[in-house]
């Protein structure tokens, strides 16, 4: 039993340390270490094989790997700039909406991309305040954007449809929107000034490309469900591929733009990350660690909320904590499928650790750009994070 625990903690340490350098490789290495300590080299290798030959999983990974390509092409082609420049909204809404919109596209250093816009619109705010706005709102739509990897991958791990969790994550989106406005935007004054004339075409073309994928994904999955067609990940692949094709036709398939986007976004690293997540889950499920954790008799609330928040805080990620917490929670309570409500509570707990930790790259990038003070940032982020966690705890006590 001791050797299994050692293997588990060594694997977690690899994730925590390795996530600062290359999260995908850290996950693969952690899976190998966990497997060698708990099962055998052959069974560990077999779990890699199972992941690589699981059609549904590989289609989903392939589909989600296209999202950063879309983000890169939008950025390199100038279509994203056209979208932002033609929003024509008030200053408070601009400060919240711009980081949120850009957050839907997993652009490396994306916080740095939205930072100049926040800086210009929030000229009267302190560096720590602009950092809070950039970080909080950049990730807020993860609660309801169905093809966001941060939401879709945990839902897949929990064995539930991403659309079944949206009614339960949506209230926490509303809560975080309110808290973000109350603590960060309420006192912002003045109006936005825009250069040039408004162009509906320059607004709608990139916006339509971005929205095509989630809308088509939902429609196709409903059709697949009606005709018992599987795997449903094919719908996601078709939806995201359609969005990408529309984008490529819009830019007339300009090779230089595509090449620059590929080198900037490095989608192969995103592929390794997603593959690493599923490998780690498969090895974990074979390791017997879930039974050891179950023997500790930790409460469901401690696992879902406490451990979820702490892992989000420690890793500065969402997928990795979810990859650990959800299987442990299922095993501890003897469940095969996670309820949508508990999923929403785990997701929100991880999210709160994720947005406040200095380990999160967006936090460090934003603090550096705005010349913000980390202590002041934590001070201003503390109340909305604490209120959100309190709401999660009360919801768990009342309804779980």
Image (cartoon, rainbow, N blue to C red):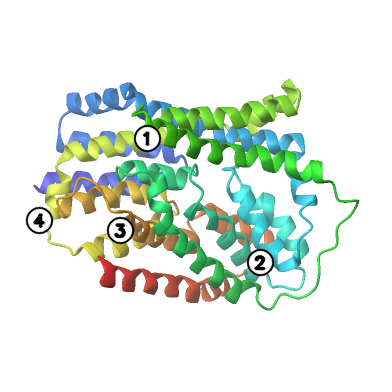
Residue 261, above or below 341 = above
N-term-proximal mark, 4 vs 1: 1
Residue 194, above or below 124 = above
Tell me what residue is drawn at x 51 percent, y 48 percent: 145
Q: Marks 3 and 4: in contact by CB < 8 Å?
A: no
Q: Is residue 372 left or right of residue 56?
A: right
Would you call the spot at circle 4 few (<14 residues within 10 Å), some (14-19), or many (20 or more)? Answer: few
The span from disc 2 to disc 3 (Cα, nearest Å) is 32 Å
Q: Which mark is residue 342?
A: 3
* One can see residue 271 in this view: no
Q: Which mark is residue 295?
A: 4
- According to the image, label 1 marks what residue? 276
Camera-nearest label, 2 or 3: 3
Q: Marks 1 and 4: in contact by CB < 8 Å?
A: no
Camera-nearest label, 1 or 3: 3
Would you call the spot at circle 3 few (<14 residues within 10 Å), some (14-19), or many (20 or more)? Answer: many
* One can see residue 363 in this view: yes
The span from disc 4 to disc 1 (Cα, nearest Å) is 27 Å
- According to the image, label 2 marks what residue? 130
The span from disc 1 to disc 3 (Cα, nearest Å) is 24 Å
N-term-proximal mark, 2 vs 3: 2
Tell me what residue is drawn at x 81 percent, y 64 percent: 192
The span from disc 4 to disc 2 (Cα, nearest Å) is 45 Å
- Residue 96: % across, % down: 65, 62
Q: Is residue 151 left or right of residue 115?
A: left
Would you call the spot at circle 2 few (<14 residues within 10 Å), some (14-19), or many (20 or more)? Answer: many
N-term-proximal mark, 1 vs 2: 2
Give the structural element (helix, strand or loop) at label 1: helix
């Amino acid at each position: 039993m001791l050797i299994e625990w050692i293997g588990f903690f060594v694997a977690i340490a690899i994730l925590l340390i390795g996530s600062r350098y290359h999260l995908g490789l850290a996950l693969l290495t952690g899976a190998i270490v966990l497997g060698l300590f708990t099962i055998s080299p052959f069974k560990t290798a077999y779990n890699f094989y199972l992941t690589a030959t699981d059609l549904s999983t590989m289609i989903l990974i392939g589909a989600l790997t296209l999202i950063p390509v879309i983000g890169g092409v939008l950025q390199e082609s100038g279509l994203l700039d056209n979208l932002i420049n033609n929003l024509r909204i008030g200053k408070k809404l601009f400060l919240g909406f711009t980081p949120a919109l850009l957050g839907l596209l997993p652009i490396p250093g994306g916080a740095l991309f939205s930072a100049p816009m926040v800086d210009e619109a929030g000229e009267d705010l302190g560096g720590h305040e602009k950092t809070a706005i950039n970080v909080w709102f950049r990730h807020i739509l993860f609660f309801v954007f169905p093809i966001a990897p941060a939401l879709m991958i945990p839902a897949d791990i929990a064995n539930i449809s991403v659309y079944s969790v949206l009614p339960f994550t949506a209230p926490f989106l509303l809560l975080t929107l309110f808290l973000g406005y109350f603590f960060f935007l309420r006192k912002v004054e003045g109006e936005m000034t825009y250069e040039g004339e408004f162009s509906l075409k320059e607004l709608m073309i990139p916006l339509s490309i971005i929205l095509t994928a989630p809308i088509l994904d939902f429609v196709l999955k409903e059709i697949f469900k009606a005709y018992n067609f599987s795997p449903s990940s094919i719908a996601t692949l078709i939806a995201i591929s359609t969005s990408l094709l529309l984008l490529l036709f819009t830019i007339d398939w300009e090779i230089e733009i595509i090449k620059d986007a590929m080198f900037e976004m490095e989608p192969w690293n995103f592929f390794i990350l997603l593959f690493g997540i599923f490998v780690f889950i498969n090895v974990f499920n074979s390791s017997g660690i879930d039974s050891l954790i179950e023997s500790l008799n930790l409460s469901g609330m401690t696992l879902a909320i406490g451990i979820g928040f702490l892992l989000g805080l420690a890793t500065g990620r969402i997928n990795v904590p979810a990859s650990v917490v959800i299987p442990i929670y299922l095993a501890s309570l003897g469940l095969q499928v996670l309820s949508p409500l508990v999923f929403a509570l785990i997701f929100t707990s991880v999210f709160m650790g994720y947005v406040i930790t200095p380990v999160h790259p967006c936090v460090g990038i934003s603090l550096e750009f705005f010349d913000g003070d980390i202590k002041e940032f934590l001070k201003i982020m503390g109340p909305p994070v604490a209120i959100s966690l309190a709401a999660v705890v009360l919801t768990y006590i009342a309804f779980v």
